[in-house]
């Protein structure tokens, strides 16, 4: 459990006023740029208007950090191309920890001790397959590897105050907590098995083409600790790809806020809004990471994953028993893996820092075929359909970014990092923090064309329901409904070009 979550509800309620003040934060001019720099950044980040040729620097979609290594299954596993030697050394050490298989306590391999007692995976790499995205089960009954299920119940009035104050993201199910762990240490039952069945949804496109979508229906079998609370809310999540995270962390907050339009004042039907969360120091920050913008930093996101996915303690989430709830007494009686000679936590701060650095510097691959007429036509279709309204093409990162290699780079992530109502079809009806059950953070698109090169089973959207990029588009609703309809109404050739553009990212 996160340290901040343990703060008392009365204290959380006392800061409500400050919370609302932060959520009203508006964009400010960038303090890291000189007037000359600011003019350059404004010029280079203007939306494209000419689609007859590629834009300058478009090929290097992560700036100087872009990797130009060979396109194969390892393409998401290379470091930022401009890392200095000592940075490359830290990256390799972090890589080792990211791939490391942890074991249950007590173990003779003390530096790897402490897995669980409840867990979803033994290693980070188990879900982020080769640093790429995970996948949903192909059919009912298949194992849900690289996919997990979040749990929560409706909050009380006092808990709702704590959520608004940023000290609680959601209220875990009383017995099972905030996440369903399907594995456990020897002698302890797992919490249950995730099952996903699919219902066929037929979509007819212009020109007579048809697409069969699969609508997932989530259930939990073989519950190990009794029934779930009747009003428990469940949400399936596949592991996202890891590339470019440090560059997203280096995007200026004001550049994101400038695109906020919570009341749709401009009447374009798109009303993205920022999610504000407490960072590891307890300060309000923009929620940039996670499917619902639940983390402000990569370090925070990494600590949450160690705790929830593998049951490992870190300085930010110091409970050695991870997601074991107070109701799971046998779980909390199990030994843990903290070794005094190695530090107070199972994953001490220096190791968490190495994994954070590794995650910050997984490089984005170079664009392909950017001058191909079909790709250029697809880019034009992308803009004309309105996709760029949420998938913001480009930014220039801050000059004072924490990692020098990631500073002041022109990047092309295709995300606004904001929450959007994506309609009934994608709704999980499970609020998280101030994100509603219909809202999702716009995911970045860079590298999406190589998802299946890295993991042939990779699937798309938060629960992996989409097997292809076209399926992913056709699930868009809510604020993206108008863009989806334009794609449906396109001539097949134009739609194919749109997909070719996405595949070039």
Image: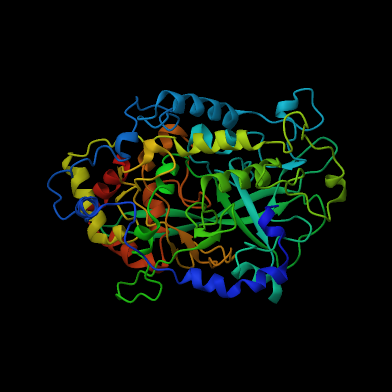
Number of numbered tags placed on the structure image? 0
Q: Is residue 502 left or right of residue 274?
A: left
Q: Position of residue 399 (x, y in %)?
A: 34, 45
Q: Position of residue 261 (x, y in %)?
A: 37, 70
In front here: 502 or 289? 289
Q: Examine the image and state in which quarter residue 387 appears.
A: bottom left
Q: Position of residue 16 (x, y in %)?
A: 60, 73
Q: Position of residue 347 (x, y in %)?
A: 67, 36
Residue 233 in the image: above or below residue 444: below
Residue 145 in the image: above or below residue 196: above
Quadrant occupied by the C terminus: top left
User: Is residue 156 visible from the viewing direction of this image?
Assistant: no
Q: Examine the image and state in which quarter residue 210 appears.
A: bottom left
In front here: 332 or 476? 332
Residue 365 in the image: above or below residue 89: below
The color scheme shown is rainbow
Residue at 68 percent of width and 40 percent of height? 310
Residue at 18 percent of width and 45 percent of height? 55
In front here: 49 or 244? 244
Q: Is residue 232 left or right of residue 369?
A: right
Residue at 27 percent of width and 60 percent of height? 206
User: Is residue 389 visible from the viewing direction of this image?
Assistant: yes
């Amino acid at each position: 459990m996160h340290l901040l979550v343990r703060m008392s509800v009365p204290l959380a309620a006392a800061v409500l006023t400050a919370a609302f003040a932060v959520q009203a934060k508006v964009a400010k001019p960038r303090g890291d740029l000189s007037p000359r720099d600011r003019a350059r950044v404004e010029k280079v980040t203007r939306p494209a208007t000419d689609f007859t040729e590629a834009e300058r620097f478009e090929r290097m979609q992560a700036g100087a950090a872009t990797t130009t290594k060979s396109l194969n299954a390892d393409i998401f596993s290379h470091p930022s191309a401009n890392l200095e030697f000592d940075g490359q050394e830290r990256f390799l050490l972090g890589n080792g920890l990211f791939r490391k298989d942890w074991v249950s306590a007590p173990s003779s391999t003390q530096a790897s001790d402490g897995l669980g007692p409840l867990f979803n995976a033994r290693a980070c790499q188990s879900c982020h397959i080769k640093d790429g995205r995970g996948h949903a089960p192909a059919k009912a009954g298949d194992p849900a590897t690289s996919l997990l299920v979040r749990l929560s119940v409706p909050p009380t009035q006092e808990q709702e105050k704590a959520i608004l104050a940023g000290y609680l993201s959601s209220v875990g199910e009383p017995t099972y907590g905030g996440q369903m762990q399907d594995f456990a240490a020897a002698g302890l039952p797992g919490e249950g098995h995730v099952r996903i069945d699919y219902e066929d949804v037929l979509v007819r496109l212009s020109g007579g083409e048809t697409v069969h979508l699969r609508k997932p229906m989530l259930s939990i079998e073989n519950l190990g600790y009794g029934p779930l609370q009747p009003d428990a809310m469940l949400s399936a999540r596949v592991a996202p790809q890891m590339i470019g995270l440090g560059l997203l962390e280096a995007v200026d907050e004001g550049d994101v806020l400038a695109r906020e339009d919570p009341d749709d004042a401009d009447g374009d039907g798109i009303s993205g809004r920022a999610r504000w969360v407490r960072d590891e120091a307890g300060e309000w920050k923009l929620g940039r990471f996670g499917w619902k913008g639940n983390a402000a930093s990569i370090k925070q996101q990494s600590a949450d994953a160690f705790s929830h996915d593998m049951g490992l303690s870190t300085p930010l989430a110091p409970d050695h028993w991870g997601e074991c709830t107070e109701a799971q007494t046998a779980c909390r009686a199990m030994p843990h893996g903290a070794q005094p000679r190695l530090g107070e936590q199972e994953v001490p701060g220096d190791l968490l820092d190495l994994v954070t650095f590794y995650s910050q510097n997984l490089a984005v691959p170079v664009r392909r075929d950017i001058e191909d007429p079909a790709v250029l036509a697809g880019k034009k279709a992308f803009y004309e359909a309105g996709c760029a309204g949420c998938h913001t093409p480009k930014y220039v990162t801050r000059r004072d970014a924490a990692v020098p290699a990631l500073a002041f780079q022109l990047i092309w992530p295709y995300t606004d990092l904001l929450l959007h109502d994506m309609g009934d079809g994608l709704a999980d009806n499970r609020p998280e923090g101030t994100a509603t059950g219909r809202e999702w953070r716009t995911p970045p698109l860079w590298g999406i064309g190589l998802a299946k090169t890295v993991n042939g089973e990779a699937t798309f959207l938060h629960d992996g329901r989409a097997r292809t990029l076209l399926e992913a588009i056709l699930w868009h609703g809510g604020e993206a409904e108008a863009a989806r309809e334009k794609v449906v109404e396109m001539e097949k050739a134009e739609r194919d070009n749109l997909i070719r553009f996405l595949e070039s990212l």
